[in-house]
Image (cartoon, grey):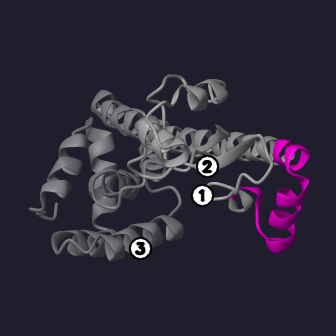
Amino acid sequence: MRLIYLPLCIAALMLCGCNKDTQGLDEKEERNPLVKQGYDYMEIKDWNKAETAFKQALENNPGMARPHLDLALIYQQYKVNYINAIYHYDRYLELRPDTENAVMIRERKAKVEEALAVHYINQSKDVKQVVAQYNRVQQENAELKRQLAALRKSTPSTAATLVKTSPQKSVTEMVPKAAVPADKTTHQIYTVVDGDTLTGIAKKFYGDDDYEPIYQANKDRMKSRGDLRVGQTLIIPNP
């Protein structure tokens, strides 16, 4: 049998320590020119060409088993593709049911299945984060629409100006980024910026640090007096 010193190939040979008949079949398949070519590529760590050689051997001889084991090891350790690794482990066990190392091979397959499960769980977490972020944006837009509707009722001229000057913008973009002139309205709208506090906002609009009217007007959207977020819109009651 051809000497193979690459660690991966040694592991494959260890896995194939089966009964006499199974071992004889594997040794015979290892002498196949394409399989030997695959081992040559494995020795120089050219996994792509090794993969191609083993696949060609299986295409020419669909009943061969040994290339399935080599491909499974490549897909598990070097060209990580857990689904392919599981498939080739299964095919080898199907074609070599009497191998004495079936338990060891199934253990390796179980590790691949575990890695695949972890991969899908991580993907699922990413999807959940995206969905949660999308839902937050939807809720914020709904709140902005509600505020804009309230603004239209209380200040028709101001709301009309906002819509007229920004016909192509989204609801989020139409919310003013600074206080709306009070004119004869009962309140103004202010967008929180980095560094804002209720005390600072009160001083900006009222000239003193009495922020309680602002907090009372926005209790439905603030969990506490310190609950301010950049981009958050606040109703500022006129003095």
Q: Image check: 44 left or right of 197?
A: left
**Residue 190's mark?**
2
Verify CB contact (< 8 Å) between mark 1 and mark 3.
Answer: no
Disc 2 crowd, CA 10 A, few/some/many (<14, 14-19, 20+): many
Give the alpha-carbon distance from disc 2 to disc 1, as whole Å.
Answer: 5 Å
- In reply to whether residue 170 is colored magenta, the answer given is yes
Residue 138 placement (x, y as % from top left): 71, 44
Q: Amino acid at mark 1?
A: Ala
Foreground of the two, 3 or 110:
110
Q: Main secondary structure of the magenta part?
A: helix
Foreground of the two, 20 or 132:
132
Give the alpha-carbon distance from disc 3 to disc 2, as whole Å.
Answer: 64 Å
Q: Is residue 139 above or below residue 223?
A: below
Q: Image check: 135 left or right of 165?
A: left
**Residue 178's mark?**
1
Report the residue marked by disc 3: 52
Disc 3 crowd, CA 10 A, few/some/many (<14, 14-19, 20+): some
Say what secondary structure mark 3 lies in.
helix
Foreground of the two, 167 or 239:
239
Q: Is residue 205 above or below residue 215?
A: below
Residue 204 placement (x, y as % from top left): 49, 48
- Who comes first in sequence, dot 3 or dot 2? 3
Q: Is residue 163 above or below residue 190?
A: below
Q: Which residues are magenta?
A: 150-172
Residue 117 found in image quarter: top left
The quarter of the image holding the N terminus is: bottom left
**Residue 196's mark?**
none
Verify CB contact (< 8 Å) between mark 3 and mark 2.
Answer: no
